[in-house]
Image: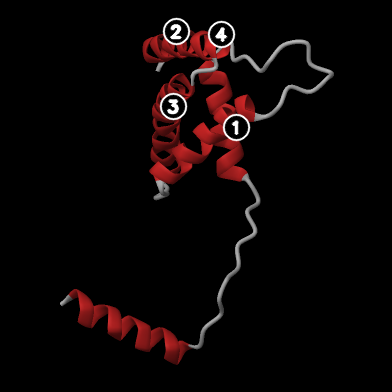
Amino acid sequence: MGKGNKEHNDLYNELQDAYLAHGDTAQLGKMYEVARQVARNYVQKYCRTKKLYLDVEELSHDAAMYLINRYLRPVSPKQSKPFYVKRLSAYIYFGVMKVLYADYKKDVEIISYEDYCSMRLKHEKISL
């Protein structure tokens, strides 16, 4: 991923400079697209090496949004400068790892075996 990351880093830095200079949200959208593409590459590589079947699109979206949300936060009084990414690949890699290993607490609905069978039969009838 060496050469591709350099191109992504350079493109992202150009977009980032334009966004920070003018506050143009269209640039932020382009930054998201570049970040999502890099995140998608990392997630796909991770899934291949670990032999996992995960929702690559959702995970890459979450990782890219992790980065983009940093720009949308107000600058704290402790910071002298707004948030700036020097190397996109490093931040996105961290975002991907954070998304993959985050402790999401999701409600799990417990259903009986009979309800499961009836739902499965309804699904099979619909798909026929």
Q: Nearer the viewer, residue 45 or 86?
A: 86
Question: In 3D space, how far apart are the residues under numbered discs 1 and 3 (Cα atoms)?
Answer: 12 Å
Circles 1 and 3 in contact, beta carbons < 8 Å: no
- Could you tell me the amino acid type at mark 2? Asp
Q: Taking 22 as reference, is 58 above or below it?
A: below
Question: Can you identify the residue that label 2 sits on?
Answer: 10
Up/down of 48 relative to 25, above or below: below
Q: Secondary structure at mark 3?
A: helix
Q: Which residue is mark 3?
A: 29
| Nearer to us: label 4 or label 3 | 4
| Residue 23 placement (x, y as % from top left) | 55, 17
Asked if 91 appears above or below 87 in the picture, the reply is below
> What is the distance, in whole Å, between disc 2 and disc 4 at their CAs?
17 Å
- The x, y position of residue 104, in whole percent, is 63, 54
Up the image or down, 37 lies above or below 1; here it is below
Q: Which residue is mark 4?
A: 21
The amino acid on which the numbered mark 1 sits, given as a three-letter code, is Asn
Mark seen at residue 69? 1
Which is in the foreground here, disc 4 or disc 1? Answer: 4
Determine crowd level at label 2: few under 14, some 14-19, many 20+ residues with C-alpha closer than 10 A: some
Q: Report the residue at 29% width, 84% height from top.
A: 122
Could you tell me the amino acid type at mark 4? Ala
Mark with earlier residue (4, 3): 4
Asked whether, in this view, residue 71 is left or right of residue 8, the answer is: right
